[in-house]
Image: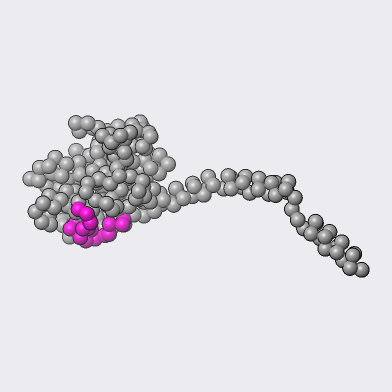
Amino acid sequence: MFRFADRGVRACHLRCAFTLLELLVVISIISLLVSIALPSLSMARRRAQAAGCLANLHHLGLAMGMYHANNNGTFWRCTMPDWPKPGTMTYFWGTNTDPVDPNASPLLKYTNLALFWCGALPWGSYVPQGNVSEPTTTYAYNAWYLDPASYKWDFTLRPKTISQIPDPSALFVFNDGALLDVWAAGGVLKNSTHMEPPEETYVQTPTTHFRHQGRSNALLADGHAAEFDLEGSPMLLPDYDLGFVGRHNAPHYQQD
């Protein structure tokens, strides 16, 4: 009687165990499913980053509207030397010090520094500009057109006002920015405070970063955020996704 029971237990163990071949088949199926799912998950993550970036720019557009309302429609300085005290350089994102003081920026009275960080260019994936060791901005400001004093280092020049822009719906205020530091060995990607135009500068240095699957997000002067492709311009630094939207300054980088 006990002998038959022992046989039944052993038979059950034999029936319930997986063979090596069955385990290999299961592992192969799981590996195949993972390989199929990973691209979709990666695509979903990139789309979420692009959507988050556009949301950031949308909120910066709201801050821009509040700034304009309290400053007669004038745009903010990109660079403010000797502010808030002699020897300190302040950008639109705060002081170029370690640690950064975002409260020194007039624009950041209406928003917060975290909105200047795009998830598709996370901290640690680039070398920061200046003397900082923390995130500042991964969006470049169109100082070339909106605040030429900061670009030309001639602070007798005044920033543009919104009323001076012929077509605000097409002009970039901020866009996904980065630059290639060619002096570093092999080239190093950095964030970029300034948005460089495709024409009229001494050296055309692309800072428009097409980090969203070949597209660059931007905040336009009328307050809306949108994504842009190359619009017929070549990707000048394809290994770094750097180029310009269009071949000419107008209408996105300059309008007069």
Query: Would you say residue 40 sits in the magenta stretch?
Result: no
Q: Residue furthest front?
A: 3
Instruction: Say how the picture is coloured.
Output: one colour
Left or right, residue 136 beside residue 24? left
Q: From the viewer's side, name the closer residue of 168 and 202.
A: 202
Q: Where on the picture, by quarter, is residue 113?
A: bottom left
Residue 172 visible at all: no
Q: Residue furthest bottom?
A: 1
Q: Is residue 185 above or below residue 119?
A: above
Residue 86 at what x, y percent from top left? Answer: 9, 53
Q: Where on the picture, by quarter, is residue 216?
A: top left
Q: Residue furthest left?
A: 156
Residue 174 at what x, y percent from top left? Answer: 28, 47
Left or right, residue 80 beside residue 114? left
Residue 205 at what x, y percent from top left? Answer: 26, 34
In the image, the segment drawn in magenta is 97-115
Q: Where on the picture, by quarter, is residue 252?
A: top left
Residue drawn at point x = 36 percent, y = 37 percent: 240
The quadrant of the rendering that contains the N terminus is bottom right
Residue 46 at what x, y percent from top left? Answer: 44, 48
Residue drawn at point x = 26 percent, y = 44 percent: 192
Residue 187 visible at all: yes
Left or right, residue 33 beside residue 77? right
Query: Would you say residue 110 sits in the magenta stretch?
Result: yes
Residue drawn at point x = 32 percent, y = 40 percent: 189
Residue drawn at point x = 31 percent, y = 57 percent: 114
Q: From the viewer's side, name the closer residue of 5 and 127.
A: 5
Numbered-mark total: 0
The quadrant of the rendering that contains the C terminus is top left
